Amino acid sequence: MRNICAKCAYILVLQFVLITTALANTLTLGEQGEVFAETDRYRVRFKEGMLVHFHNKLTQETYTLPPPQGHSNKGRSGIAMQHEEGDNGKPQAINKAWDIETQRLSPLSVEIAYHYDFILDKTVRFRISIDADTGDLIIQQHGISENVVWITWVCRYLNSQQVDVILPANCGKIIDASTEFSERHFRYPERWEAQLAILQGGDGGFFVRSTDTTFRFKSVYYIRSGEHFGLSFQTDNPAPFRGKNEITSVEWRLNAYRGDWQVPAEIYRNWMETTFQPKQPPAWVKDLELIIYAPYQPLDLSILPLLAEHVNPSTTLLYVIGWYDPNQGLEPDYPPDSEWGDFLEAAHGYGFRVMPRITFHGCSPYSPLYPEFEKYQLRHPTSGHRLGYALNDPTYDYPTAYINPASKAFRKYVVEQMKTLYETYPIDALHLDINTSVVNDANGLIDGLTAAEGNVLLHQELAAAMPGIVLGGENVHEVTFFNTNLAQRWSYTNKQPHPISSFLFSSWTIPYGFHVPNPDWEPERYQQFQEAYIVWDVLPTIRIRAPGMLTNPNMVRTRDFLKSVQMGQSWEQTWNIDVGMDIVGDVNGDGVVNIQDLVIVANAFGKAEPDLNGDGVVNIQDLVIVANAFE
């Protein structure tokens, strides 16, 4: 009897252990398609196809609130249809489900089918699974309808007072309760630069990511109302939409974490590196201290010796826009200016690196080549209108039509032109303007490729035709980062910058300034750039368009900027100087750091000022700052 009782007790203990282990990953189906998911990291509830509750078991934080009283579901969910083509074509969400059916596919996978119409077959199948290896909650949808544009799922009732949204969007952005806008749409890849959204609470948070490697068009949509906000995650069908009667979303993964935003960001960055194998920047790019927007036409060689006096040429890159003569040829032809060869040779003689600019996939409508490439011009996915720059502006002399780089003929022509340029003029880098323009082209596939696939190929083919070239671009995102080592960063549209994008991309693609206003000529506009660039750790960038800018005694901030770089000060210190801050270490304000500043700091030990490192007291650390800044 004792043995039997012992055996029964053992079985009960074993069952308890097995049940406890199983409870670490559980999926439960409730009424009307409710789903409860639990792992050792989180508890989640879905209702009507929406995530409405998220609890982080690692930090004991709950990031959602009960729905407000009288709330009706106006969020985007399910599938969308395009009822008409052309200018009137608009996606329309379908929200009301007529019938719901559920099924369990496996112990850790369930599916809920939402039928939206009792006459026509409009259905969204919403599959929720738990990855037993990672604990990730996996969401994937399949939709059936007429002319499907996109499919989406939603996180609802998130607490706007306690949860911030951190997105690699618009160069890196944080959205919190103080954010001015209440609604915003970020499209991948142009604005939402990587397939990651981080929801940061007090001691941790949760994150949503996609591991799609085909560059499917997708987006994240933010909407806030009072203390609640929601996020929608959308997957698009490839355009054109007419005749596409089903869609399968990318696979979305959720998980919880403890700590700050860098925890999930590092997980995603490691995945990016493994998946895309980005090109490492050469040593000279890593050593860069400064990028100068050199003069437009005419090229003026007299600026080079003046620049060499104010900067370290070996660690300075000259970005040259006016190196070719549009009067002799139009994009995608770039006939060099008559002074270009001499300018390049002289710049290299001083030790500068030089980067001319071309338009990545541009073709002038006035070019004799345009009739050949016109059929490949990118078109808006819904309206179908042709895309380009200043196409309808009669006052602009040099409009640009955007050609889909999926066109083999177009890529071949551009690559041949750049190969000839490189073999004739040994440039160090090539700036590819609008290279982050990746459009869901209403033309459909070109030569069997999407615009994103063509974008990747054009980068790779340019690099192969110009061995050793460094490619730079206008902005950066997941389609371009693994083939570019330099990228301009926009700033004027982002009022709440965050370092997330720099964290993800800067190991391979170093950010620099985008047409930065000169700090002496436009100090207020410059400050708007400067504030974001400090957050993003952007390489110091300045415009020096004419020799007089270096000899004019009134260009004080310009000279201070260059002097800061020469002194080896940090990028943050350099950006700060140009909004009127003193040179770090220049205690007496005479424009130079010397023994006089050292004496002032030494005599002020124990006092509150001059406190250079912000710790509230003058001490040996402040003395070291002055000593390190000596000329």
Image (cartoon, grey):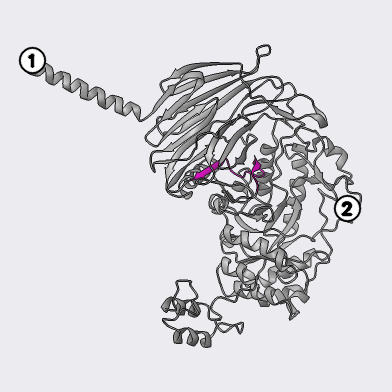
Kindly indicate whether the residue at mark 1 contacts the one at mark 2 (C-beta within 8 angstroms).
no
Taking depth in this image into account, of 433 and 526 the one nearest to the observer is 526
| Res 342 → quadrant | bottom right
Taking depth in this image into account, of 177 and 199 the one nearest to the observer is 177
Residue 211 in view:
no
| Res 182 → quadrant | top right
The secondary structure type at the circle numbered 1 is loop
Q: Amino acid at mark 1?
A: Met
Q: Kindly report which numbered mark, 2 or 1, lies closer to the viewer in this rendering.
A: 1
Instruction: Indicate the quadrant containing the N terminus: top left, top right, bottom left or bottom right.
Output: top left
Instruction: Indicate the quadrant containing the C terminus: top left, top right, bottom left or bottom right.
Output: bottom right
Cα distance, mark 2 to mark 1?
98 Å
**Is 308 situated above or below 41?**
below
| Res 546 → quadrant | bottom right
| Badge 1 density bin: few <14, some 14–19, many ≥20, Cα 10 Å | few
Looking at this rendering, what residue extends furthest in the front direction? 69
Return the residue at label 2. 396
Q: Amino acid at mark 2?
A: Tyr
Q: In this image, 28 relative to 412: left or right?
A: left
| Badge 2 density bin: few <14, some 14–19, many ≥20, Cα 10 Å | few
Give the x, y percent position of residue 562: 65, 73
**Residue 195 colored in magenta in the image:** yes
Residue 480 in view:
yes
Return the residue at label 1. 1
Q: In this image, 347 relative to 157: left or right?
A: right
Q: Residue at x 77, y 60 (%)?
A: 321
How many numbered marks are there? 2
Give the x, y percent position of residue 16: 25, 25
Give the x, y percent position of residue 447: 73, 31
